[in-house]
Image (spheres, rainbow, N blue to C red):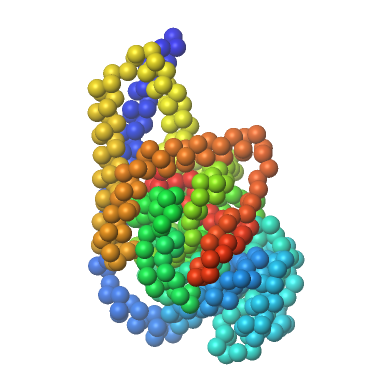
């Protein structure tokens, strides 16, 4: 009986793998449609001219929480203020910093406390005061001071309460934004009133040369682990999310960078303070709200690099991040199980969440069990090694083809990197990924599932970053980016 079960499981693994391959092929086709449709849809110069001159161009608030950022807060804020967009504000939320973050902001940006009618649309930890600059150069800078809420979500909600414009960007204060980041993401909203959220592409700042808060030279990461993640994010955005966006079935909008309709976010209840997958959680609730009230909606991915962020460069930090992502994924399905296979929630309920459940949530479990089944069959001599090698080489070849397609898409869109040899490093990562990076991701995901099931206390912990300045120093921050939850959208 036991041998029959193991034999049956072997077939399950085979058909599961074929289903995953077929889904990636479909996503590649959909992504190509989305990428080239947008590429030739309009003339960029004309679109930029219309945005700059139209009186109907909507205002956008950039909301960035800050916690103990005194060493880099000035250059980070200057970077956010460098947007080439006619109507925007930067809302920095000082989330109860224990260092001199607030004092540094006050001193360097000539801030003074001003009276402000703070309306708490979304409940947060207590608001204290609001600052604006006396220097006209920083007239679109707002600093909100509040008590520490323990999570990024609480700080973003406070920024929403204090923001002025109908759309907002959720980002991190230490991210580097492209100067045209808002312009790229506002275009789908100007083309359709149904768009409630727009995701911009993110990539690694590790290895890039940065001056005055701007990327001046783009290079692949020097860190072994960050190099794998660069490929992972390219695959996620250019195949996964672009494919899902084509059929309006986006699973999430990155927590590190995304543009949202503020009215829908507030109506959906704002960000959940206890969520470990806030990016996916927010989109599910926004789409759920629109479906419940029969409102048309679209969530869009744009094929343009809008944000550079520092990725985990050590295995220890990667462990903390991916373990939390695994925990966040199972938390999301437990919390939003009513959406799964529910046709009332359209593509989200019938396509996106079933796919994520089968090919993302179950994948680590199936692969983990499959490893032990393979070892057992190897010791009992039940493996047809010739067939096994052929199947392995077929799947491995497909992974390399997928990587080449991703790199081709990236190059076609203008290129994350300027030099061809930079792409060779990414392709080398693709060659090694199944043997080095992917097994660790599977293990960390399983670890996250166990932490959730056995109710181990969730700790955000500290993440050591090298920072974006030329000074060689380390800084520790409370947060880690939650923008690609456990491989959602095709990164695994």
Q: Is residue 51 visible?
A: yes
Residue at 30 percent across and 79 percent down: it is 45
Q: Would residue 88 be found to the left or right of residue 492 on screen?
A: right
Q: Is residue 321 visible?
A: no
Percent across and percent down for residue 348 are: 45, 48
Percent across and percent down for residue 197 are: 47, 62
Percent across and percent down for residue 55 are: 44, 85
Residue at 42 percent across and 43 percent down: it is 437
Quadrant where the N terminus lies? Answer: top left
Q: Quadrant of residue 262?
A: bottom right
Quadrant where the C terminus lies? Answer: top left
Percent across and percent down for residue 322 are: 52, 45
Residue at 51 percent across and 39 percent down: it is 445
Total residue callouts: 0
Front-most of residues 370 and 144:
370
Q: Residue furthest front?
A: 472
Q: Quadrant of residue 413?
A: bottom left
Front-most of residues 301 and 206:
206
Residue at 59 percent across and 35 percent down: it is 450
Q: Is residue 427 above or below residue 111?
A: above
């Amino acid at each position: 009986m036991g041998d029959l079960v193991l034999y049956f499981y072997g077939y399950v693994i085979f058909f599961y793998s074929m289903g995953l391959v077929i889904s990636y092929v479909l996503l590649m086709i959909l992504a190509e449609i989305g990428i080239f449709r947008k590429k030739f849809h309009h003339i960029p110069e004309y679109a930029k001219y219309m945005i700059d001159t139209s009186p109907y161009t909507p205002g956008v608030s950039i909301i960035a929480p800050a916690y103990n950022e005194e060493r880099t807060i000035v250059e980070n804020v200057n970077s956010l203020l460098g947007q080439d967009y006619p109507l925007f504000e930067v809302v920095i939320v000082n989330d109860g910093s224990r260092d001199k973050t607030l004092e540094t902001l006050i001193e360097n940006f000539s801030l003074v406390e001003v009276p402000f009618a703070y309306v708490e649309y979304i409940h947060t930890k207590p608001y204290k005061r609001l600052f604006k600059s006396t220097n006209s150069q920083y007239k679109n800078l707002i600093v909100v001071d509040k008590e520490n809420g323990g999570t990024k979500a609480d700080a973003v909600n406070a920024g929403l309460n204090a923001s002025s414009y109908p759309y907002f960007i959720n980002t991190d204060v230490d991210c580097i934004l492209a100067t045209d980041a808002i312009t790229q993401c506002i275009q789908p909203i100007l083309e359709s009133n149904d768009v409630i959220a727009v995701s911009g592409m993110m990539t690694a700042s590790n290895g890039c040369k940065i001056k005055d808060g701007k990327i001046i030279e783009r290079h692949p990461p020097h860190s072994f682990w960050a190099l794998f993640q660069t490929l992972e994010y390219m695959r996620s955005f250019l195949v996964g999310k672009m494919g899902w966006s084509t059929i309006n079935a986006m699973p999430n909008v990155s927590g590190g960078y995304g543009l949202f309709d503020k009215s829908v976010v507030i109506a959906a209840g704002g960000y959940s303070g206890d969520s470990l997958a806030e990016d996916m959680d927010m989109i599910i609730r926004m789409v759920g709200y629109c479906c419940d009230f029969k409102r048309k909606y679209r969530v869009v991915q744009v094929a343009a690099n809008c944000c550079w962020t520092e990725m985990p460069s050590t295995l220890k930090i990667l462990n903390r991040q991916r373990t939390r992502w695994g925990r966040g994924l199972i938390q999301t399905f437990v919390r939003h199980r009513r959406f799964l296979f529910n046709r009332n929630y359209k593509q989200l309920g019938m396509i996106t969440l079933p796919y994520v459940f089968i090919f993302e949530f179950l994948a680590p479990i199936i692969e983990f069990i499959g490893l032990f089944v393979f070892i057992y069959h190897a010791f009992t001599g039940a493996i047809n090694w010739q067939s096994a090698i052929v199947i392995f080489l077929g799947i491995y070849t497909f992974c390399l083809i997928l990587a080449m397609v991703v790199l081709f898409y990236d190059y076609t869109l203008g290129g994350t990197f300027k030099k061809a040899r930079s792409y060779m490093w990414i392709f080398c990562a693709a060659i090694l990924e199944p043997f080095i990076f992917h097994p660790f991701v599977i293990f960390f995901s399983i670890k996250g599932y166990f932490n959730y099931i056995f109710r181990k206390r969730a700790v955000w912990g500290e993440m050591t970053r090298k920072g974006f300045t030329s000074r060689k120093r380390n800084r520790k921050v409370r947060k880690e980016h939650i923008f690609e939850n456990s491989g959602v959208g095709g990164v695994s």
